Image (spheres, rainbow, N blue to C red):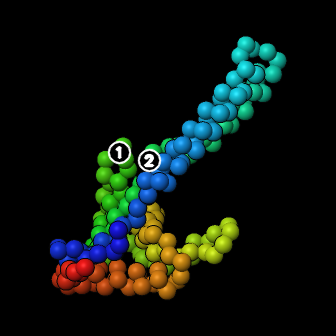
Amino acid sequence: MMDTIGEDGLFRHPVPVPFALRLFLVLAGLFVVTVATWELHPGVWPPNITSPFFFFLILGAWSVGGPVAWAGLNGAAGLWIVGPGRITIERKRPFLKLRRDTFGENDMHLEVVEVEAMEGDSTWAVILSAADGRRFETREFRTRAAAERLLKRIETAFAATEPLKPQRD
């Protein structure tokens, strides 16, 4: 789904979490937990002198695999809805209710930020910094120019005195 201006004249920018990524994270997390527990449980039961060592290895696997699986189950997909004088950010998680935050001119700041990568080229995103310290991020872009174009579109929709004209495909 790409950025759109709907029939209501509001600019929408989706920040999706693809189903394939969710599925991969859940399966990877469950794999780590299952394999470590299955392979190492004979070292824990029946109790013996090495039981604490193997138990801590199993706990380590759970401490890595559990959060990875949880991220797949609970990662928030977002939708930025920009209209005259307000930005609403909706965050939807598969098993939790929709969270919605609305910001006006005085309680937020927009900027383009470089998202550094460990390997490969860095990416760029538009960041909304709320007055209360929370930060919300758009999709990442390969170039600064692309992120700046999105920032310009957001600022244009925000500064408009009336809703924008819908886009026709």
Q: Which mark is residue 136?
A: none
The front one of 27 and 60 is: 27
Q: CA distance from mark 1 to mark 2?
A: 8 Å
Residue underneath mark 2: 74
Quadrant housing the C terminus = bottom left
Residue 67 visible from this viewpoint: no
At which x and y percent is residue 4? 29, 75
Residue underneath mark 1: 96
Q: Residue at x 37, y 47 (%)?
A: 94
Instruction: Assess disc 2: are there few (<14), some (14-19) or many (≥20) residues with their C-alpha within 10 Å of its C-alpha.
Output: some
Q: Is residue 94 left or right of residue 35?
A: left
Q: Residue at x 38, y 50 (%)?
A: 93
Helix, strand or loop at label 1? It is loop
Tell me which label, 1 or 2, sits earlier in the chain: 2
Quadrant housing the N terminus = bottom left
At which x and y percent is residue 115? 57, 72
At which x and y percent is residue 103? 32, 68
Q: For the residue marked with disc 1, what is the amino acid?
A: Leu
